[in-house]
Amino acid sequence: MANLKEIRNRISSVSSTMQITSAMKMVSAAKLKKAQDAITAMRPYADKLTELLQSLSATLDADSGSKYSDQREVNNVLIVSITSNRGLCGAFNSNIIKQTQNLISNTYAGKKVSVLAIGKKANDAFSKKQIVVGNYSELFDDLTFDNVANVAKRLMNMFTEGEYDKIVIVYNKFKNAATQEIMTEQFLPIVPVEADVNVNLDYIFEPSKIEIVEQLIPKSLKTQLFKSIRDSFASEHGARMTAMHKATDNATELRDQLKLTYNKARQASITNEILEIVGGAEALNN
């Protein structure tokens, strides 16, 4: 059994760790509330924008497609991998890295695949393989629509200029504080929308439907990327809060076990001292 000093040192170390994890949990909980409100408020707008775009697209002729819906033979693929800049959030980052690696090794095996990293963890994981063509970790320092729109513009230019034939986004979708869903969404080309025979938009369009769609598509793509990053941002804080909660519980349990071990060792030490005193007194009497 370890001596009393070693056990005291371990109790002190575990208590310090517990204070840190508890503080990190509270910080993540505060940030989660703000991030959750932001993504919850944004989803209806993003969904309605997509619905409007689909309604308009369904009424257009097949030959009036956008340059962003150009279906080409897939040879060059770009994966936008969205992780966090920091760790201590459970399997949040490793799940995205594994999914990205799965796409590279299986889904797009035989293709030339590159990665655009949003988050330091993705950049660290794939820069060693020399397939990272961009790192936008600084987005999380000032997460605004304008900053994300600049990244979306670059992605759109890469596609329209023929640099990549397909662009997909891999991220964690926020469901609740304890649950995140790994999403793989096609960013470009735009997934063709099946025309709905019941679509009947009895409106006068100014400008024309085609011009409206051409203006809506870039805005919709920027919104899609922004929503994905917002989802990931909220998921990160939810995952970190959950991980730190579990870490705090584990540290509390370990501290209690160490205290019990310390008390047993202390009692054993006291008992031995009493036995030595009694033994010495008996020896003097004899």
Image (cartoon, rainbow, N blue to C red):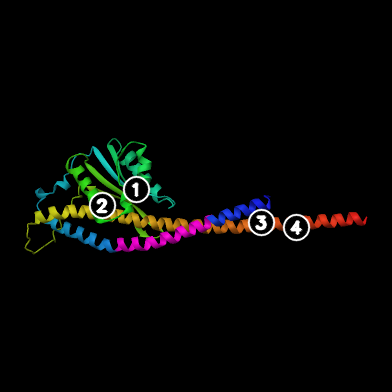
Secondary element type, mark 2: helix
Amino acid on which disc 4 is placed:
Ile
**Mark 3 or mark 4: which comes first in sequence?**
3
Secondary element type, mark 1: loop
Secondary element type, mark 4: helix
Identify residue for label 2. 148
**Mark 1 or mark 2: which comes first in sequence?**
1
Which quarter of the figure has residue 41? bottom left
Q: Within 10 Å of the Cα at label 3, are there few (<14), some (14-19), or many (20+) other Cα atoms?
A: many
The image shows residue 203 at horizontal and vertical percentages of 8, 64
**Mark 3 or mark 1: which comes first in sequence?**
1
- Mark 1 vs mark 2, CA separation in Å: 13 Å
Identify residue for label 3. 262
Amino acid on which disc 2 is placed:
Val
Front position in the image: 223 or 28 = 28
Q: Residue at x 17, y 53 (%)?
A: 217
Screen quadrant of the C terminus = bottom right
Q: Within 10 Å of the Cα at label 4, are there few (<14), some (14-19), or many (20+) other Cα atoms?
A: few
Identify residue for label 1. 119
What secondary structure characterizes most of the magenta part?
A: helix
